[in-house]
Image (tube, grey):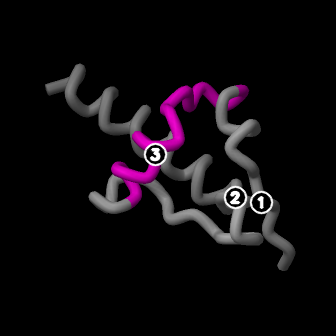
Amino acid sequence: MSQQLIAYEGLSPKGIVYSKVQLWRLERAGKFPQRVKLSPQRVAWIESEIDEWIAARISARRESVAA
C-alpha cells in the first residue's frame, strides 16, 4: 500500500496554519504526527496520519460540546 506524503506547504489547505517551529514543538510533545525527513532541508508528513489527527481534533470538539 502506498502512502502519500504531504509537505509543509500542503498543510495550510487542510487548515493547519502552524509555523514550522510550532509544529516541531507539537511533534516533540507527542501532539502532532512525526515528520519524515526526506533530505537535510526537506521534511514531509504521512497524509493519512495528518487526516487522522484532524479527525481526532474534530471528534474531541464534538465530545466536549456534548458533555
Pointer 2: what residue?
44
Residue drawn at x 61%, y 47% is 51
Q: Does the residue at mark 1 contact the one at mark 2 (Cβ under 8 Å)? A: yes
Residue under label 3? 23
State the residue lying farthest toward the left: 67
Going by the numbered disc 1, the residue's amino acid type is Leu
Q: Which residue is mark 1?
A: 5
Residue 37 in the magenta stretch? The answer is: no
Q: Residues within 10 Å of mark 1 (few under 14, many from 20)?
A: some
Q: Please identify the dominant SS of the magenta region.
A: helix
Residue drawn 72% across and 27% down?
13
Magenta residues span 13-27
Which comes before the other along the chain, label 1 or label 2?
1
* Residue in the foreground of this view, choosing between 39 and 13: 39
Sequence-first tag of 3 and 2: 3
Percent x, y for residue 33? 49, 59
